[in-house]
Image (cartoon, helix red, strand yellow):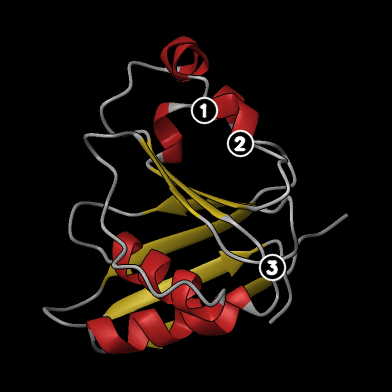
Amino acid sequence: MERCLTERSSFSPQETEALGQSLARYLKPGAVVALYGGLGAGKTCLAKGIARGLGIGENITSPTYTIISEYPAEIPLYHIDAYRLGGDDDFAGTGAGEYIGAQGITLIEWPERIPRSIPPDAITVRIEISGPHSRIVRIEGIEL
């Protein structure tokens, strides 16, 4: 089965957040979103928009040092940053695997660090830096 692919351009952090807010409307409880992109690509900006789209008013920051941030809402948001993890075994040791497929939305930054932990039906978002303020965002696995 072929997964649908949507490509969008963003020309500011605000546009990236707005794209995340739009994406949130299509996410269902249990969804896993794998956010790929280099440092400064806009993964956390997109996460902020998804949170806003889920009705979360808290300030969303990258959970690089905490690994997992939980945001309660009608549909809870679990924001995981795998950057500092040493692989799938390290991920399992944090207990973060319990969030995958849970009743909320799970966002995972740096999923390439934990490839065996990412479910095959995860929605993938790849953010490519295309200029000083511009990004190309490719979303696969959900139709927008």
Q: CA distance from mark 2 to mark 1?
A: 6 Å
Q: Is residue 16 above or below residue 91?
A: below
Q: In the image, is 87 to the left or to the right of 61?
A: right
Whether residue 126 is visible, yes or no, is: yes
Q: Which residue is mark 2?
A: 99
Q: Which residue is mark 3?
A: 27
Sequence-first tag of 2 and 3: 3
Q: Position of residue 94 (x, y in %)?
A: 44, 18
* Callout 1 touching callout 3 (CB < 8 Å): no
Quarter of the image holding residue 75? bottom right
Q: CA distance from mark 2 to mark 3?
A: 15 Å
Q: Amino acid at mark 1?
A: Ala
Q: CA distance from mark 1 to mark 3?
A: 20 Å
Instruction: Report the number of numbered marks.
Output: 3
Q: Is residue 95 above or below residue 124?
A: above
Callout 3 environment at 10 Å: few (<14), some (14 to 19), or many (20+)?
Answer: some
Q: Position of residue 81 (x, y in %)?
A: 36, 40
Whether residue 7 is visible, yes or no, is: no
Q: In the rendered view of the protein, which quadrant contains the C terminus?
A: bottom right
> Residue 96 got which mark?
1
